[in-house]
Image (tube, helix red, strand yellow):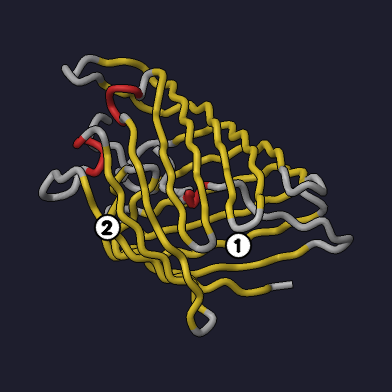
């Protein structure tokens, strides 16, 4: 994730978010799926990466275990993420999960991030709650508000409340990344149209360094179009 601001995930997203825990298969056979899409603005955990970003990935799921990769063209280089983990779903709809994610970059876009991810969540009717706690290490250095070096370790916590197709996420960075990356809120809505998944979201950061766009605004909107397909 591009940290030119002070030296993370140019996912989850993730993602999420892109960073809610992955949905896994409990079937006897492995499921392999692919995805491809484009982001008007790639903003991950409140951090602006690039505009007009094409991306794609491949995932395998088997009996709660998952592994995959996700690649994005971020202009000044390529981001490629590798991840694996396990999610256990209880009959009540509650789940617990743990995984490992590595964010790699070509050229000089950013340095490597490696992190352990813990997930929990539940669904009750039309409402869902997803929690994430991450501990990571950055192959670089975070700076505080005065430009002083803080270190290379970070943690990240996020809570997402969903209602039908709408969601609200609050995320916060800690440890050495506290001053550098701060916290953010994201409000979004996802819908399906003609086999495509469309998402529109507004991201508001509590630290103007995070968005890091041309106008240095604290609020930004983006649109995502993605296509998911079965491989096996």
Residue placed at 23% from the left, 33% from the top? Answer: 207
Mark toward the start of the polypeptide (1 vs 2): 1
Residue 14 visible somewhere in the drawing: no
Alpha carbon of mark 1 to alpha carbon of mark 2: how far? Answer: 27 Å
Q: Is residue 15 left or right of residue 96?
A: left
Q: Mark 1 highlights which residue?
A: 58
Residue 192 in the image: above or below residue 83: below
Which residue is at the far right?
A: 28
Q: Which mark, residue 221? A: 2
Q: Position of residue 172 (x, y in %)?
A: 40, 31
Relative vertical location of residue 195 with respect to residue 103 in this rendering, above or below: below
Q: Secondary structure at mark 1?
A: strand
Residue sitting at x 43%, y 24% = 154
Q: Determine if residue 157 is in view.
A: yes
Instruction: Count all numbered tags in the image, as a single digit.
Output: 2
- Choose between 220 and 144: the one closer to the eye: 220
Q: Nearer the viewer, residue 197 or 138?
A: 197
Horizontal and vertical percent position of residue 231: 68, 73
Residue 222, percent from left and from top = 30, 60
Which residue is at a point 28% across and 55% down the rendered structure image?
Answer: 50
- In front: 59, or 225? 225
Which residue is rendered at x = 46% and y = 65% of the image?
190
Question: Which label sits on residue 225?
Answer: none
């Amino acid at each position: 994730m591009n940290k030119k601001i002070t030296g993370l995930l140019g996912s989850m997203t993730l993602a999420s978010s892109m960073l809610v825990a992955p949905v896994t298969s409990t079937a006897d056979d492995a499921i392999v799926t692919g995805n491809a899409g484009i982001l008007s603005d790639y903003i991950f955990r409140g951090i602006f990466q690039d505009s007009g970003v094409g991306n794609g990935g491949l995932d395998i799921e088997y009996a709660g275990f998952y592994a995959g990769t996700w690649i994005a063209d971020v202009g000044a280089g390529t981001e490629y993420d590798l991840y694996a983990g396990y999610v256990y779903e209880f009959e009540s709809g509650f789940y617990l999960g743990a995984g490992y994610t590595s964010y790699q970059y070509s050229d000089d876009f950013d340095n490597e991030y490696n992190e352990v991810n813990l997930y929990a969540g539940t669904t009750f009717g039309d409402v869902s709650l997803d929690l994430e706690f991450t501990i990571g290490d950055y192959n670089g250095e975070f700076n505080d508000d005065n430009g002083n070096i803080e270190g290379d370790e970070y943690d990240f916590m996020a809570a997402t409340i969903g209602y039908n197709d709408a969601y609200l996420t609050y995320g916060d960075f800690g440890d050495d990344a506290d001053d550098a990356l701060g916290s953010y809120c994201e409000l979004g809505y996802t819908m399906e149209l003609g086999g495509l998944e469309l998402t529109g979201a507004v991201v508001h950061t509590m630290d103007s360094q995070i968005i890091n766009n041309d106008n240095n605004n604290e609020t930004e909107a983006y649109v995502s179009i993605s296509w998911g397909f079965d491989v096996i």
